[in-house]
Image (spheres, coloured by chain):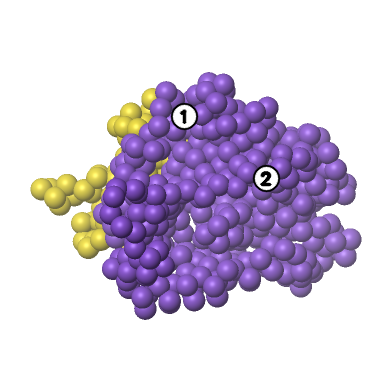
Amino acid sequence: MNIDEIFDNTSFTIDREAHIVLDYDICTGCDNRGCVNSCPARCYSWSEEDQKMTFVHDGCLECGTCYVVCHRNAFTRWRYPRGGFGVAYRMT
Amino acid sequence: MSKTYQAIVIGAGPAGSSAALIMARAGLDVALVERGTFPGEKNMFGGVLHRLPALEEIFPDFWDRAALGRHIVKKSVTFMTGDSSFSTTIEAGNFDTTPYNGYSIFRPRFDNWLAQEAVKAGATLITSATVDDLIYKDGKLAGVSIVGRHGELLAPVVIAADGVLSFIAKKAGLRQPTFDPGQMAVGVKALIDMPREMIDDRFGLVREQGFANEFVGCTTGVRGGGFLYTNYDSLSVGLVFHLASLRTSGKTPYDMLNAFMEQPQLAKMICGGKLQEYSAHLIPEGGYDMIPELVGDGILVAGDAAALCNATGLNLEGINLASQSGVLAGKAVIEAHQNKDFSKQGLSVYKKLLDESYVIKDLKMYRKAPHMLHNDRIYNEYPELMCSFMEYIYRINGAPKENLSKLFLKSAKEKIGLGNLLADGFSAWRAL
């Protein structure tokens, strides 16, 4: 299971409008960043060099792990994608 | 444009569709609102559906009628280390006769089937609709709005069956504004395609028989466990992690899933299969202490949204509790319509019915189980102890035998410590 190839294994209808929006300044000041390792879809990556969080919503499995592990409430928005968008499981 | 119904159900999962079904059968005009393009599209779980008493009451022929998979006749628990495993297996004749004890199912099929039964009973299914907010008029709950859509859906009563994160329960002020990672788990799963004959031969199954295997010790010390379930022509293989433990571990779910699938004994089970789908979902594992307020003015909370999930360490139940709570919430709404009282007081019969059912009784009984399972030794030291002890018992190498009970105590002392062993035994006894 190569997480880089998530789009080969799981279907998504990607919305241009992100359903999760972060306040990156909060992430920069965070001492934990459990989202980076906990997210099962590797949507979060932290650059030590730039001291910057990057979040990509494209491969989000809508599980809510980040919403629960983030103890700084860095989300300016966390909702499910609007109807018809996001992950589409076929046989799980 | 707004449309008016007698009740709105948010979420067409097992709780929501069960609620919609029972209300529609009683003649109520019900809207069943689902964010997926079809019910089940967003849903994922480990893979075994237990008996559903609430639905069996509605459909006496439930087990012939529902979209099910193999029935589980064989169950194993495996204690696993990096290169060894020790399993116990129960295969019972009773598991092979109707009513079957459990089935492997696919949520996109099963949930869709159940929602379509609600539609057949007269409910209006509205798909591709993510509920945005609750609407209040004159201080009373009046309906819901949908993300990206104009107009609103109106009803005097709403059932929030919107899943584990229940933003609706939050908006209604019924759940805490934040979750405790210690009360949540995340499951990740690989769906592995495999020819049916290969599955039958490999796992010793015939006809429609299925196999369920749970694993401890396969999560590299993170609190959690693993599973493997047989579908007709695929295997569901996955891991579940407690979020508090996962967060601090620095490890990733997919790396641990890969390591699990590469563990020599597991690798043999899935060898020859092909990865078809990868999925993830949260599980509310806090048990009784995690349950939010279940009833408010004009609103009831059911299923995962109400944290009705029973993780005892031996079984993991959720869909059965969800459908039961959905049916009871539906009954409360039917009664509220008869009395024309949608206040918290008027709907409170839901809580009473739930308290009297196995749902709350079981959750109360296993109230201490989540605490017991927050013990790192279960996930590392105990599986190692089991495997090394069994290996010793069966190893014949010319060395004289030691007394087994002395040896067990000696290795338990080394790996776990006698004080811990006693404390863990006591904690398990109290919890279970």
The x and y percentages for residue B247 are 32, 57
Judge left or right: residue B261 versus residue B305. Answer: left
Closer-to-camera residue (B170/B409): B409
Label 2 vs label 1: CA separation? 26 Å
Disc 2 is placed on an element classified as loop
Query: Dot 1: within a 10 Å radius of its alpha carbon, few (fewer than 14), some, or many (20 or more) residues?
Result: many
Which residue is drawn at the image coordinates 46% and 29% (left, top)? B192
Judge left or right: residue B104 versus residue A34. Answer: right
Name the quadrant containing residue B185: bottom left
Closer-to-camera residue (B333/B309): B309
Which residue is drawn at the image coordinates 35% and 54% (left, top)? B392
The x and y percentages for residue B131 are 58, 47
Judge left or right: residue B157 versus residue B314. Answer: right
Which residue is drawn at the image coordinates 58% and 69% (left, top)? B432
Is there any visible trace of residue A37 in the rendered image?
no
The purple-tinted chain is B
The x and y percentages for residue B56 are 80, 47
Q: Chain of mark 1?
A: B
The yellow-tinted chain is A
First in sequence, mark 2 or 1: give its number. 2
Disc 1 is placed on an element classified as strand
Q: Kindly identify which residue carries mark 2.
A: B92
Q: Are marks 2 and 1 on the same chain?
A: yes
Which label sits on residue B233?
Answer: none
Name the quadrant containing residue B311: bottom right
Which label sits on residue B192?
Answer: 1
